[in-house]
Amino acid sequence: NFISSIVMLAQNRMRIGDFIQMGDIMGTIVSIDTRVTILQALDGSQIVIPNQTMLNTTVVSYSINPLRRIQIDVGVDYNTDLPMVTSLVKGILDKHPDVVPKPASTVLVSEFGNSSIVLTVFFWIESTKNWQSIRSNIAYRIKKAFNEVGVNIPFPIRTLKIDEDDKAFLKTMESLRKGTVPGAKVIPAEEVV
């Protein structure tokens, strides 16, 4: 671990203040000691990672590059005017104060889903900014704009195929709900003893 810390510091690839991810662990480096690196996780907890693990594991750094690309996927109804929606979302991104103009933001039709056409929205922000807050704010603005122009974000739809046995069952259930028994002979009230 001691040698690992010397190698890490000599390579100068990770610095205090960098936001990194190792597997499921994400956080900001708050300390690099002779044996361990300490991260502050998004929930405020501190994670102690042996330096040897830091060297032997894939580490994604979100701080090395000055910009970070953010992605939002949003589904729209199949009847949606795609050029209009694409232009609407692009306008939201172009006007947002935290979205950098270059590289340019992109809105792509990425999938024909079961109940919607999926748009994938890519935009860039400065790495030092709070990406989660900015992503949430842009998602909010997209939803608000969709509401204003009547664009529907559909719920998943399931189609049920009912065969003859199911139809008979449903008919029986409907009859019971009405208080009758299907196939039973109706006895006039005056014949009931």
Image (cartoon, grey):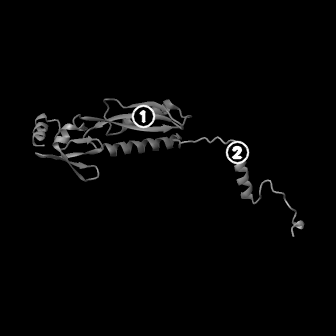
Q: Which mark is residue 165?
A: 2
Q: Is residue 128 left or right of residue 4?
A: right
Counting labels gives 2
Measured as percent of width and height from the top left, residue 84 is found at 49, 32
Q: Which mark is residue 43?
A: none
Q: Residue at x 12, y 46 (%)?
A: 33
Q: Residue furthest bottom?
A: 193
Measured as percent of width and height from the top left, residue 54 is found at 19, 40
Q: Classify the position of the N terminus by image quarter.
A: top left
Q: Are marks 1 and 2 in contact (CB under 8 Å)?
A: no
Q: Say if 159 sits above or below 190 in the image.
A: above
Residue behind mark 1: 120
Q: Amino acid at mark 1?
A: Thr
Label 2: few (<14), some (14–19) or many (≥20) C-alpha neighbours in 10 Å: few
Q: Residue at x 51, y 35 (%)?
A: 113
Q: Say if 57 sits above or below 181 in the image.
A: above
Q: Say if 186 sits above or below 98 in the image.
A: below
Measured as percent of width and height from the top left, residue 86 is found at 46, 32
Q: Amino acid at mark 2?
A: Asp
Measured as percent of width and height from the top left, residue 160 is found at 62, 42
Q: Secondary structure at mark 2?
A: helix
Of 43 and 180, the residue lying toward us: 180
Q: CA distance from mark 1 to mark 2?
A: 43 Å
Q: Is residue 127 left or right of residue 192?
A: left
Q: Classify the position of the C terminus by image quarter.
A: bottom right
